[in-house]
Protein backbone atom coordinates (compact mmCIF):
# COMPACT_ATOMS: atom_id res chain seq x y z
CA UNK A 1 0.00 0.00 0.00
CA UNK A 2 1.31 3.46 -0.85
CA UNK A 3 1.18 6.12 1.84
CA UNK A 4 -1.12 9.05 1.19
CA UNK A 5 0.02 11.33 4.03
CA UNK A 6 1.18 14.79 2.99
CA UNK A 7 4.24 16.82 3.90
CA UNK A 8 3.81 19.35 6.72
CA UNK A 9 5.64 22.66 6.89
CA UNK A 10 4.39 24.34 10.07
CA UNK A 11 4.26 23.62 13.79
CA UNK A 12 1.19 21.74 15.01
CA UNK A 13 -0.28 20.17 18.15
CA UNK A 14 -0.65 16.39 18.02
CA UNK A 15 -3.88 16.27 20.05
CA UNK A 16 -7.13 18.19 20.36
CA UNK A 17 -8.10 19.53 23.80
CA UNK A 18 -10.22 16.37 24.20
CA UNK A 19 -7.20 14.13 23.65
CA UNK A 20 -8.07 12.92 20.18
CA UNK A 21 -5.82 13.12 17.15
CA UNK A 22 -5.72 16.60 15.68
CA UNK A 23 -6.63 16.18 11.97
CA UNK A 24 -4.12 18.90 11.08
CA UNK A 25 -1.33 16.82 12.65
CA UNK A 26 -1.60 14.01 10.11
CA UNK A 27 1.32 13.85 7.72
CA UNK A 28 5.11 13.84 7.77
CA UNK A 29 7.90 16.39 7.85
CA UNK A 30 11.64 16.79 7.31
CA UNK A 31 12.14 18.28 10.78
CA UNK A 32 10.19 17.84 14.02
CA UNK A 33 7.11 20.08 13.97
CA UNK A 34 4.73 18.33 16.38
CA UNK A 35 4.00 19.25 19.98
CA UNK A 36 2.94 15.97 21.56
CA UNK A 37 0.34 17.15 24.07
CA UNK A 38 -0.95 13.67 24.96
CA UNK A 39 -4.32 13.53 26.70
CA UNK A 40 -5.32 9.92 26.06
CA UNK A 41 -6.59 7.37 28.60
CA UNK A 42 -4.18 6.31 31.33
CA UNK A 43 -2.38 3.10 30.48
CA UNK A 44 -2.62 3.58 26.72
CA UNK A 45 -0.17 6.47 26.49
CA UNK A 46 3.42 5.65 25.51
CA UNK A 47 6.39 8.00 25.55
CA UNK A 48 9.95 7.04 24.79
CA UNK A 49 13.33 8.50 23.93
CA UNK A 50 15.80 5.98 22.53
CA UNK A 51 19.35 6.69 21.44
CA UNK A 52 21.53 4.20 19.60
CA UNK A 53 25.17 4.93 18.80
CA UNK A 54 27.02 2.60 16.44
CA UNK A 55 30.64 2.35 15.41
CA UNK A 56 32.83 -0.36 13.92
CA UNK A 57 32.73 -3.08 16.55
CA UNK A 58 30.35 -1.55 19.08
CA UNK A 59 26.88 -0.34 19.99
CA UNK A 60 25.67 1.89 22.82
CA UNK A 61 21.89 1.90 23.39
CA UNK A 62 20.11 4.14 25.90
CA UNK A 63 16.37 4.10 26.59
CA UNK A 64 14.07 6.22 28.74
CA UNK A 65 10.39 5.25 28.44
CA UNK A 66 7.10 5.98 30.21
CA UNK A 67 4.13 3.64 29.69
CA UNK A 68 1.97 5.23 32.44
CA UNK A 69 1.88 2.10 34.60
CA UNK A 70 5.61 1.47 34.20
CA UNK A 71 8.73 3.49 33.58
CA UNK A 72 11.84 1.95 32.08
CA UNK A 73 15.42 3.22 31.97
CA UNK A 74 18.10 1.06 30.40
CA UNK A 75 21.60 1.10 28.98
CA UNK A 76 23.38 -1.47 26.83
CA UNK A 77 26.98 -1.65 25.64
CA UNK A 78 27.54 -4.35 23.05
CA UNK A 79 30.98 -5.53 21.91
CA UNK A 80 30.37 -7.04 18.49
CA UNK A 81 33.76 -8.73 18.29
CA UNK A 82 33.22 -10.80 21.43
CA UNK A 83 29.41 -10.70 21.63
CA UNK A 84 29.65 -9.38 25.20
CA UNK A 85 26.56 -7.53 26.42
CA UNK A 86 26.87 -5.20 29.40
CA UNK A 87 23.41 -4.03 30.35
CA UNK A 88 21.46 -2.37 33.12
CA UNK A 89 17.65 -2.20 33.14
CA UNK A 90 15.70 -0.32 35.81
CA UNK A 91 11.89 -0.65 35.89
CA UNK A 92 10.00 2.00 37.86
CA UNK A 93 6.39 1.23 38.89
CA UNK A 94 3.90 3.87 37.71
CA UNK A 95 6.82 5.71 36.07
CA UNK A 96 7.18 7.71 39.29
CA UNK A 97 9.47 10.70 38.78
CA UNK A 98 9.61 10.31 35.01
CA UNK A 99 9.42 13.47 32.90
CA UNK A 100 9.75 13.90 29.14
CA UNK A 101 9.32 16.89 26.85
CA UNK A 102 6.45 17.20 24.36
CA UNK A 103 8.88 18.12 21.56
CA UNK A 104 12.07 16.61 20.20
CA UNK A 105 14.99 18.02 22.15
CA UNK A 106 12.61 20.17 24.18
CA UNK A 107 14.27 19.52 27.55
CA UNK A 108 17.04 17.55 29.22
CA UNK A 109 16.28 14.05 30.45
CA UNK A 110 18.09 12.84 33.58
CA UNK A 111 17.61 9.58 35.43
CA UNK A 112 19.49 8.14 38.38
CA UNK A 113 18.46 5.13 40.41
CA UNK A 114 19.37 1.55 41.34
CA UNK A 115 22.86 1.86 39.94
CA UNK A 116 22.04 3.48 36.60
CA UNK A 117 22.65 7.03 35.50
CA UNK A 118 21.29 8.35 32.21
CA UNK A 119 21.59 11.88 30.85
CA UNK A 120 20.29 13.25 27.56
CA UNK A 121 21.56 16.84 27.68
CA UNK A 122 20.58 19.31 24.96
CA UNK A 123 23.50 21.49 23.85
CA UNK A 124 24.00 24.00 21.06
CA UNK A 125 25.84 21.43 18.94
CA UNK A 126 23.52 18.49 19.59
CA UNK A 127 22.62 16.05 22.37
CA UNK A 128 25.13 14.82 24.92
CA UNK A 129 24.55 11.25 26.07
CA UNK A 130 25.99 10.24 29.44
CA UNK A 131 25.63 6.95 31.26
CA UNK A 132 27.22 5.09 34.14
CA UNK A 133 26.33 1.61 35.39
CA UNK A 134 27.73 -1.72 36.50
CA UNK A 135 27.05 -5.01 34.77
CA UNK A 136 28.64 -8.43 35.30
CA UNK A 137 31.09 -6.87 37.73
CA UNK A 138 32.27 -4.26 35.23
CA UNK A 139 31.88 -0.49 35.40
CA UNK A 140 30.64 1.11 32.19
CA UNK A 141 30.91 4.86 31.58
CA UNK A 142 30.13 6.80 28.43
CA UNK A 143 30.08 10.44 27.38
CA UNK A 144 29.09 10.92 23.73
CA UNK A 145 28.00 14.02 21.82
CA UNK A 146 25.59 13.35 18.96
CA UNK A 147 25.72 16.35 16.64
CA UNK A 148 22.84 17.82 14.65
CA UNK A 149 24.39 19.38 11.53
CA UNK A 150 22.54 22.49 10.28
CA UNK A 151 19.90 21.59 7.71
CA UNK A 152 20.11 17.87 8.40
CA UNK A 153 16.75 16.33 7.48
CA UNK A 154 14.97 13.68 9.55
CA UNK A 155 11.86 11.53 9.23
CA UNK A 156 8.91 12.69 11.34
CA UNK A 157 5.48 11.13 10.87
CA UNK A 158 2.10 10.64 12.51
CA UNK A 159 0.67 7.13 12.25
CA UNK A 160 -3.14 7.32 12.68
CA UNK A 161 -4.90 4.09 13.63
CA UNK A 162 -7.99 6.10 14.59
CA UNK A 163 -9.02 9.37 16.24
CA UNK A 164 -8.23 7.85 19.63
CA UNK A 165 -5.18 5.73 18.79
CA UNK A 166 -2.16 7.27 17.07
CA UNK A 167 1.59 7.77 17.28
CA UNK A 168 4.07 10.50 16.45
CA UNK A 169 7.56 9.22 15.73
CA UNK A 170 10.78 11.05 14.90
CA UNK A 171 13.48 8.84 13.43
CA UNK A 172 16.85 10.54 13.06
CA UNK A 173 19.95 8.74 11.86
CA UNK A 174 23.36 9.48 10.27
CA UNK A 175 24.02 11.97 13.09
CA UNK A 176 27.81 12.24 13.69
CA UNK A 177 28.85 11.03 17.14
CA UNK A 178 32.07 11.62 19.07
CA UNK A 179 33.03 10.71 22.59
CA UNK A 180 34.46 8.20 25.00
CA UNK A 181 33.29 4.81 26.23
CA UNK A 182 35.05 3.18 29.20
CA UNK A 183 34.86 -0.31 30.67
CA UNK A 184 36.69 -0.62 34.01
CA UNK A 185 38.71 2.45 33.08
CA UNK A 186 39.82 1.12 29.70
CA UNK A 187 38.96 3.91 27.30
CA UNK A 188 37.68 3.68 23.75
CA UNK A 189 37.45 6.84 21.66
CA UNK A 190 34.73 6.92 19.01
CA UNK A 191 34.68 9.48 16.21
CA UNK A 192 35.78 11.37 14.30
CA UNK A 193 38.58 9.06 13.08
CA UNK A 194 36.75 5.98 14.36
CA UNK A 195 33.54 6.94 12.61
CA UNK A 196 30.36 6.71 14.69
CA UNK A 197 26.73 7.68 14.19
CA UNK A 198 23.82 8.36 16.50
CA UNK A 199 20.19 7.42 15.90
CA UNK A 200 17.22 8.86 17.77
CA UNK A 201 13.82 7.21 18.08
CA UNK A 202 11.46 9.72 19.71
CA UNK A 203 7.94 8.38 20.18
CA UNK A 204 4.77 9.81 21.71
CA UNK A 205 1.33 8.31 21.25
CA UNK A 206 -1.78 6.46 22.36
CA UNK A 207 -1.45 2.81 21.44
CA UNK A 208 -3.68 -0.24 21.00
CA UNK A 209 -3.22 -3.07 23.48
CA UNK A 210 -1.66 -5.53 21.02
CA UNK A 211 1.15 -4.40 18.73
CA UNK A 212 3.62 -5.98 16.31
CA UNK A 213 6.30 -4.02 14.53
CA UNK A 214 9.50 -4.29 12.53
CA UNK A 215 12.17 -1.63 12.54
CA UNK A 216 15.40 -1.41 10.58
CA UNK A 217 18.01 1.34 10.74
CA UNK A 218 21.57 1.81 9.53
CA UNK A 219 24.08 4.63 9.10
CA UNK A 220 27.41 4.75 7.31
CA UNK A 221 29.45 5.91 4.35
CA UNK A 222 28.76 4.50 0.88
CA UNK A 223 31.01 5.63 -1.99
CA UNK A 224 31.86 8.84 -0.17
CA UNK A 225 28.25 9.64 0.74
CA UNK A 226 26.74 9.41 4.21
CA UNK A 227 23.75 7.08 3.86
CA UNK A 228 21.03 6.28 6.37
CA UNK A 229 18.36 3.59 6.09
CA UNK A 230 15.09 3.88 8.02
CA UNK A 231 12.30 1.35 7.50
CA UNK A 232 9.34 0.15 9.54
CA UNK A 233 6.66 -2.41 8.97
CA UNK A 234 3.50 -4.11 10.23
CA UNK A 235 2.46 -1.46 12.75
CA UNK A 236 1.75 1.12 10.03
CA UNK A 237 -0.18 -1.26 7.74
CA UNK A 238 -3.51 0.15 6.58
CA UNK A 239 -2.96 3.62 8.06
CA UNK A 240 -1.85 5.39 4.88
CA UNK A 241 1.33 6.46 6.69
CA UNK A 242 4.82 4.99 6.55
CA UNK A 243 8.02 5.58 8.50
CA UNK A 244 10.24 4.68 5.56
CA UNK A 245 13.02 6.83 4.21
CA UNK A 246 16.58 7.06 2.96
CA UNK A 247 18.92 9.83 4.10
CA UNK A 248 21.72 10.74 1.67
CA UNK A 249 24.22 13.40 2.79
CA UNK A 250 21.66 14.87 5.18
CA UNK A 251 18.73 14.98 2.75
CA UNK A 252 15.66 12.82 3.34
CA UNK A 253 14.24 10.78 0.47
CA UNK A 254 10.81 9.73 1.74
CA UNK A 255 9.54 6.30 0.73
CA UNK A 256 5.76 6.52 0.67
CA UNK A 257 4.98 2.85 0.12
CA UNK A 258 4.94 -0.03 2.59
CA UNK A 259 8.08 -2.06 3.16
CA UNK A 260 7.92 -5.82 3.69
CA UNK A 261 10.18 -7.68 6.10
CA UNK A 262 10.76 -11.36 5.32
CA UNK A 263 12.60 -13.43 7.94
CA UNK A 264 12.52 -16.77 9.73
CA UNK A 265 10.78 -16.42 13.10
CA UNK A 266 12.24 -19.78 14.15
CA UNK A 267 15.76 -18.43 13.72
CA UNK A 268 16.21 -14.66 13.64
CA UNK A 269 19.92 -15.12 12.89
CA UNK A 270 19.12 -16.27 9.38
CA UNK A 271 19.24 -13.61 6.61
CA UNK A 272 16.36 -11.15 6.33
CA UNK A 273 14.91 -9.65 3.15
CA UNK A 274 13.59 -6.07 3.23
CA UNK A 275 11.83 -4.65 0.17
CA UNK A 276 9.22 -2.16 -0.97
CA UNK A 277 5.86 -3.71 -1.82
CA UNK A 278 5.24 -2.28 -5.29
CA UNK A 279 8.49 -0.81 -6.61
CA UNK A 280 12.23 -1.45 -6.70
CA UNK A 281 13.15 1.48 -4.43
CA UNK A 282 14.26 -0.82 -1.61
CA UNK A 283 15.84 -4.23 -2.22
CA UNK A 284 18.00 -5.21 0.72
CA UNK A 285 19.39 -8.29 2.42
CA UNK A 286 20.22 -8.10 6.11
CA UNK A 287 22.73 -10.53 7.61
CA UNK A 288 22.58 -10.63 11.43
CA UNK A 289 25.79 -11.05 13.39
CA UNK A 290 24.31 -10.78 16.89
CA UNK A 291 20.82 -11.29 18.29
CA UNK A 292 19.63 -9.75 21.54
CA UNK A 293 16.46 -11.30 22.93
CA UNK A 294 14.46 -9.36 25.50
CA UNK A 295 11.35 -10.90 26.99
CA UNK A 296 9.37 -8.98 29.60
CA UNK A 297 6.51 -10.99 31.14
CA UNK A 298 4.22 -8.85 33.30
CA UNK A 299 0.91 -9.60 34.97
CA UNK A 300 -1.17 -7.45 32.64
CA UNK A 301 1.37 -6.71 29.90
CA UNK A 302 4.47 -8.05 28.26
CA UNK A 303 6.89 -7.69 25.38
CA UNK A 304 9.03 -9.97 23.26
CA UNK A 305 11.83 -8.28 21.32
CA UNK A 306 14.25 -9.87 18.87
CA UNK A 307 16.89 -7.24 18.08
CA UNK A 308 19.53 -8.22 15.53
CA UNK A 309 22.68 -6.28 14.71
CA UNK A 310 24.34 -6.91 11.39
CA UNK A 311 24.98 -5.66 7.88
CA UNK A 312 22.78 -4.56 4.99
CA UNK A 313 23.56 -5.20 1.34
CA UNK A 314 21.56 -4.45 -1.78
CA UNK A 315 20.15 -1.36 -3.45
CA UNK A 316 18.00 1.64 -2.55
CA UNK A 317 16.83 4.51 -4.74
CA UNK A 318 16.49 8.20 -3.98
CA UNK A 319 13.62 10.46 -5.02
CA UNK A 320 14.97 11.04 -8.51
CA UNK A 321 15.85 7.41 -9.14
CA UNK A 322 19.41 7.82 -7.88
CA UNK A 323 20.73 4.33 -7.16
CA UNK A 324 22.76 3.65 -4.05
CA UNK A 325 24.49 0.28 -3.88
CA UNK A 326 24.82 -0.80 -0.25
CA UNK A 327 27.48 -3.35 0.68
CA UNK A 328 27.94 -4.18 4.35
CA UNK A 329 26.29 -1.11 5.90
CA UNK A 330 26.09 -1.71 9.66
CA UNK A 331 22.83 -1.37 11.56
CA UNK A 332 19.99 -3.35 13.07
CA UNK A 333 16.63 -4.94 12.38
CA UNK A 334 14.07 -6.03 14.95
CA UNK A 335 10.73 -7.63 15.60
CA UNK A 336 8.71 -6.46 18.59
CA UNK A 337 5.52 -8.10 19.86
CA UNK A 338 3.86 -6.31 22.74
CA UNK A 339 0.76 -6.59 24.87
CA UNK A 340 0.86 -3.29 26.71
Image (tube, rainbow, N blue to C red):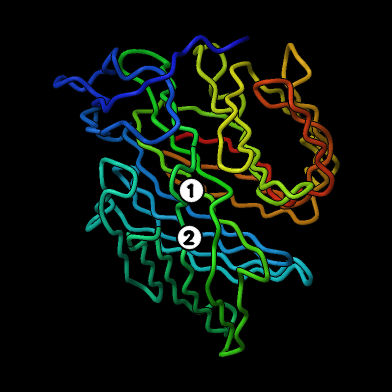
What is the distance, in whole Å, between disc 2 and disc 1 at their CAs? Answer: 10 Å
| Quadrant showing the C terminus | top left
Q: Earlier in the sequence, mark 2 or mark 1?
A: 2
Residue placed furthest toward the bottom? 185
Label 2: which residue?
A: 146
Q: Nearer the viewer, residue 74 or 8?
A: 8
Looking at the image, which residue is at 38% across and 23% down? 166
Residue 241 x, y percent position in the rendering: 50, 17
- Front disc: 2 or 1: 2
Q: Local crowd at mark 2 within 10 Å, few (<14), some, or many (≥20)?
A: many
Label 1: which residue?
A: 200
Looking at the image, which residue is at 44% across and 22% down? 159
Q: Is residue 336 above or below residue 143?
A: above
The image quarter in which residue 334 lies: top right
Q: Local crowd at mark 1 within 10 Å, few (<14), some, or many (≥20)?
A: many
Give yes or no for contact between labels 2 and 1 (Cβ–Cβ under 8 Å): yes
- Tell me the number on the disc at residue 63: none
Residue 203 x, y percent position in the rendering: 40, 39
Q: Is residue 317 above or below residue 100?
A: above
Residue 277 x, y percent position in the rendering: 72, 15
Q: Is residue 113 above or below residue 152?
A: below
Q: How many marks?
A: 2
Looking at the image, which residue is at 32% across and 49% down? 105
| Quadrant showing the N terminus | top right
Residue 12 visible? The answer is yes
Regarding mark 2 in the picture, which secondary structure is present there? Answer: strand
Residue 215 visible? The answer is no
Amino acid sequence: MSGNSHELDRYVALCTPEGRLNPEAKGWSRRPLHRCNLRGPWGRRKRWDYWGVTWEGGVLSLTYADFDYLGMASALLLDLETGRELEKVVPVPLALGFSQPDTVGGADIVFEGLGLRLEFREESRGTRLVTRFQSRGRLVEADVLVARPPGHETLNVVVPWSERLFQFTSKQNTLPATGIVRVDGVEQVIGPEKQAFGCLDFGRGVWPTHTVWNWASASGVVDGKVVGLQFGGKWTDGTGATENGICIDGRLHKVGEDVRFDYDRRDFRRPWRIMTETSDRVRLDFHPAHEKRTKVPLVVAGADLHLCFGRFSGEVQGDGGERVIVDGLFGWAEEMRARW
